[in-house]
Image (cartoon, helix red, strand yellow):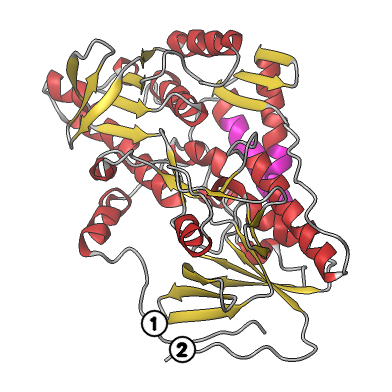
Amino acid sequence: MSHTAPARPGTPHDVVVIGSGFGGLFATQALRDAPVRVTVIDQTATHLFQPLLYQVATGVLSVGEISPATRDVLRRQRNARVLLGVVTEIDLAHRVVVSSSPLGETRTRYDSLVVAAGAGQSYFGNDRFADFAPGLKSIDDALEIRGRVFGAFELAELTSDPQERARLTTFVVVGAGPTGVEMAGQLAELAHRSLRGNFRHLDPAQARILLVDPVPQVLPGYPERLQAAAARTLEGLGVELLTGHKVVDVDAGSVSLEDSDGTRTRVPAQTKIWAAGVAASPLGRSLGEQTGAEVDRAGRVAVEPNGSLPGHPEVFVVGDMASRPGVPGVAPAAMQSGRYAAQEIVRHVRGEPTGRPFVYRDKGSLATISRFAAVAKIGPVQSAGFGAWLLWLGVHIVYLVGFKNRVTTLLHWAVSFIGRGRSERAATWQQVVGRGALRSRGADRPTRPTGDVAGG
């Protein structure tokens, strides 16, 4: 039976951070010189640079370049430690976080808590689509998609049936936001450029890439000028834009679409990628139930102006889990809100006033479409083309964690963008089918309760 050790008089202020994404990592690093002890609990113990997952999925980058080990990132921060675990419960009344690992249950006490568990893919109530159309929110997602994409070309080389070959080389990307646009652009580059000359019976350039979304334009939320520029670039790459269409069914060999007139079309396609919609961690709903805080349809919990949980000034919800007016669910917002939560904790520990509203500073919007082509909106400035791509390149290099990661990423980008190679094409059958097998057995999450770790 597990238990929580009682707090010891004179011990430092214990801060628990759930998640080591942008919000969690930036909160932890902002506490480097604070008189606190920090415990980071994360289910992978890696910091994932999620905006570049699509490049892992299409063979541009390796997993290690976008997901360094969290404990390595924090190795010089002596007041921080990392625990592996899936958080299953937050007990606000007793200030305890319960997490699970293959070794059992761990209970970690806190004085202040930063909840930065992020968000996963939303299928808008059609979760069965996940078996046939993986999302792009995790390393597992990216590796599964990479196996499906390169495997589809390999199978197409084997078949002599023109219809089967067409089905195998039809790729459907669902969602025309930045992730979907970037994914579709890279698939087009892969088919029309990178794989040229790799096959003897298959012409990869004959592949179809469909980008599907019910919205009328790609990149919703961007200025019309940039939407039009992105659409022109995608169409120039051979991407078929099916805006104004929604997905009504997905199975192993096809996707069914419905247009604005209600007409349905079945598209034979081996590979489907879901880049539409997000759902916050289930911890958000749990916090809402315990406090009465409002939780929106995406599972994000409404927070106080400074990011704390209503009625619990010691608990901060940051990043994709927080619902607050005017703050989008993007990486810069997670970084800023995580850092601000840490500043509020430091002010509390020092006995200084807290509760000042968090102010989000919009750093702009960037989306890359293909090599040397991107769109950018920075304040009133709008840019499309090579200049925007250089800006995108610089911003992503700056935010990658670790000097080694920056160097190797630049080398891989040189190979892929200046040349036409893809150095990370290895994929295994296990990556493609293993997750589905685990889900069917209910074994994709550790849940056995046994041990205990308290906050010291």
Please state which amino acid type lies under the numbered disc 1: Pro
Q: Give the range drawn in magenta.
A: 397-415
Closer to the chain start, of discs 2 and 1, is: 2
Separation of marks 2 and 1 at Cα, in angstroms: 8 Å
Kindly identify which residue carries mark 2: 2
Q: Is 410 in the magenta?
A: yes
Pointer 2 and pointer 1: residues touching (CB < 8 Å)?
yes
The answer to whether residue 447 is above or below residue 389 is below
- Identify the residue shown where x is 57% and y is 73%: 83
Decide which of 65, 120 is in the foreground and name it: 120
Where is residue 193 shown, x and y percent of the image? 44, 20
- Identify the residue shown where x is 26% and y is 58%: 439
Please state which amino acid type lies under the numbered disc 2: Ser
Res 85 visible: no
The answer to whether residue 18 is above or below residue 296 is below
- How dense is the environment of label 1, judged by Cα within 10 Å: few (below 14), some, or many (20 and up)? some
The answer to whether residue 41 is above or below residue 198 is below
- Identify the residue shown where x is 59% and y is 90%: 5
Kindly identify which residue carries mark 1: 449
